[in-house]
C-alpha cells in the first residue's frame, strides 16, 4: 500500500496539483464582447447616437431608464447634447384596449411607413408594467415583421416608478431616437385612462384604435380620451365584421360632432381598416400626413410642441419635488403616524398635511444654513 503523504516529514499540508494547461480563452469572442461593454463617456454616447448606432442608442436608453443617480447624471448630459439634433420627426401616439389589435396594426402600419423611407422607433408607455414585472407593450415578439426590419427600433415600456416617471423617460427616449435619425416615432399605450394623457402630451398625432362591437361602442371609452384623438380607426373591418365596423364609424363621427372643435382646427377623422388583412392601412398614414401638413401650415404644430415642452418642465419639477419629499427620512418616519391620526379622527387631513410639509420645509432650511 503506498504511504500516505502526511506521514512524510516534508509534507506541508498543501498540495497543488499541476492540472492541465488552460486555453487562452474558451470563447475568443467573449473578449471582444467585454471590450464593447466598457463604460462609455458622454461624448462616446453622443457621437454614437448621432451616427445612428443602435447599440449605443440602446445603451443610452438603458441609462435614461436607470434609477441610479450616476446613470441619470450621464443620461441627462447626453440628452442635453442630443437636444439640438432632435425634434425633426413625426410623433404618433397609438392607443387602444388590449385586444384592439395594436401590435398587429403597428407591425403592418410600421412596415408601410418604412416602405416610404426613413426610420421608425416604436416606444411604449405601459402603466401596468410595474405591477406585472413585464411589459405587455412595445414587445418585439408582438411585432414580428417590424422587429427584423433594419429601419426599426422597438423598445418596451420603462418599468420603474410612477406613470409620470415612466412617461418622462419615454419622452427623453424620443429625443435620443430623433437624434439617432429616427424620423417617425410611435408611442403605444393601453387604452385604460391616464396613460393616454401622458402619451398625448408628447405626440403630434393621437390615434385611437377601436373595435366595432355590440352597438354600444361609445360606452366604455371615456369622453376625455375621445376628445384627445386626432383620428379614430376601427380595426378588424374584415369578413362579416365590415358592416358593423362601418356602423361604428358612423356612430363615432356623430359623437365627435358633439364635442367642441379642437384647437388645431382639424376635424378628427374616423376610418375603418383591417390590420390583420392589411386593408385600409395606407389611408391611415395618408390621414396623418394630411394632418401634419395642415397643422404645420396653420402654426398649431409648433404651438403644440411648445406647450408640451412647457408641460414637461412642470411635470419634471413636480416629480422631483414629490420624490424628494417622500424619500426624506424624517418624513418617511412621520408619515405612518400622521396617517394613523387622520384615520382615527385625531387630526384632519389638512392639518396633517400642513404639519408634514412644515417639517419638510424646516428640514430643508436647516440643511441650507
Ligand atoms: P393588442 O393587444 O391591442 O396589441 O392586440 P393584438 O394585435 O395582439 O390583436 C389581438 C387579436 O386580434 C389577435 O388575435 C389578432 O390576430 C386579432 N386581430 C388583430 N387585428 C385584426 C384584424 O384586423 N382583423 C381580425 N379579424 N383580427 C385581428
Image (tube, rainbow, N blue to C red):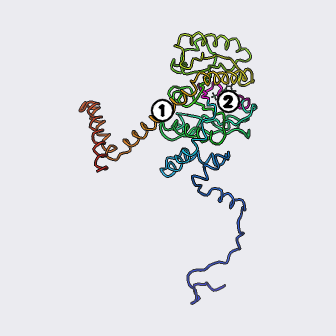
- Choose the circle earlier in sequence order: 1 or 2: 2
Q: Residues within 10 Å of mark 2 (few under 14, many from 20)?
A: many
Secondary structure at badge 2 equals helix
Relative height, residue 318 to residue 45 (above, below): above
Tell me the quadrant of ligand 1. top right
Was residue 109 drawn as part of the magenta stretch in this picture?
yes
As rendered, which of 142 and 304 lies closer to the eye? 304
Horizontal and vertical percent position of residue 201: 53, 29
Is the residue marked 2 within 8 Å of ligand 1, measured from its CB?
yes
Q: Residue at x 65, y 56 (%)?
A: 36
Compared with residue 315, is residue 271 higher up or lower down, i.e. above or below? above
Q: Nearer the viewer, residue 193 or 200?
A: 200
Per the rendered image, the range of residues in magenta is 92-112
The residue wearing badge 2 is: 106
Residues 2 and 342: in front is 342
Neighbour tally class for label 1: few under 14, some 14-19, many 20 plus, Cα within 10 Å: few
Q: Taking 62 as reference, is 340 left or right?
A: left
**For residue 25, above or below residue 260:** below
Q: Which numbered disc, 1 or 2, marks the residue closer to the eye?
A: 1
Query: Picture quarter containing residue 343?
Result: top left
Instruction: Classify residue 20 by image quadrant.
Output: bottom right
- The image's mark for residue 310 is 1
**Position in image of residue 49 (x %, y %):** 64, 46
Amino acid at each position: 500500500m503506498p504511504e500516505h503523504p502526511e506521514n512524510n516529514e516534508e509534507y506541508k499540508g498543501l498540495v497543488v496539483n499541476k492540472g492541465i494547461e488552460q486555453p487562452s480563452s474558451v470563447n475568443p469572442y467573449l473578449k471582444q464582447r467585454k471590450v464593447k461593454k466598457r463604460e462609455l463617456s458622454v461624448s462616446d454616447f453622443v457621437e454614437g447616437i448621432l451616427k445612428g448606432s443602435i447599440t449605443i442608442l440602446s445603451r443610452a436608453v438603458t441609462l435614461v431608464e436607470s434609477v441610479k443617480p450616476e446613470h441619470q447624471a450621464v443620461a441627462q448630459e447626453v440628452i442635453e447634447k442630443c437636444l439640438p439634433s432632435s425634434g425633426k420627426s413625426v410623433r404618433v401616439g397609438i392607443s387602444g384596449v388590449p385586444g384592439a389589435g395594436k401590435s398587429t396594426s403597428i407591425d403592418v402600419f410600421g412596415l408601410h411607413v418604412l416602405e416610404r423611407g426613413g426610420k421608425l422607433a416604436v416606444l411604449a408607455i405601459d402603466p401596468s408594467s410595474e405591477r406585472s414585472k413585464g411589459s405587455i407593450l412595445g414587445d418585439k415578439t408582438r411585432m414580428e415583421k417590424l422587429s427584423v426590419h433594419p429601419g426599426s427600433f422597438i423598445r418596451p415600456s420603462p418599468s420603474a416608478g410612477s406613470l409620470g416617471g415612466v412617461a418622462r423617460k419615454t419622452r427623453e427616449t424620443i429625443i435620443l431616437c430623433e437624434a439617432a435619425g429616427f424620423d417617425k416615432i410611435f408611442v403605444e399605450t393601453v387604452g385604460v385612462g391616464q396613460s393616454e394623457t401622458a402619451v398625448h402630451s408628447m405626440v403630434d398625432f393621437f390615434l385611437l384604435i377601436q373595435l366595432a362591437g355590440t352597438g354600444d361602442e361609445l360606452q366604455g371609452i371615456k369622453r376625455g380620451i375621445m376628445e384627445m384623438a386626432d383620428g379614430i380607426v376601427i380595426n378588424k373591418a374584415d369578413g362579416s365584421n365590415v358592416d358593423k365596423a362601418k356602423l361604428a364609424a358612423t356612430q363615432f363621427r356623430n359623437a365627435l360632432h358633439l364635442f367642441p372643435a379642437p384647437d388645431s382646427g382639424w376635424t378628427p377623422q374616423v376610418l375603418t381598416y383591417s390590420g390583420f388583412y392589411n386593408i385600409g392601412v395606407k389611408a391611415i398614414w395618408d390621414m396623418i400626413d394630411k394632418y401634419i401638413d395642415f397643422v404645420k401650415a396653420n402654426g398649431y404644430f409648433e404651438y403644440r410642441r411648445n406647450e408640451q415642452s412647457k408641460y414637461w418642465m412642470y411635470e419634471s419639477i413636480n416629480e422631483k419635488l414629490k420624490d424628494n419629499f417622500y424619500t426624506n427620512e424624517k418624513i418617511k418616519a412621520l408619515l405612518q403616524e400622521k396617517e394613523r391620526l387622520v384615520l382615527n379622527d385625531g387630526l384632519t387631513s389638512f392639518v396633517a398635511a400642513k404639519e408634514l410639509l412644515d417639517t419638510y420645509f424646516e428640514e430643508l432650511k436647516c440643511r441650507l444654513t
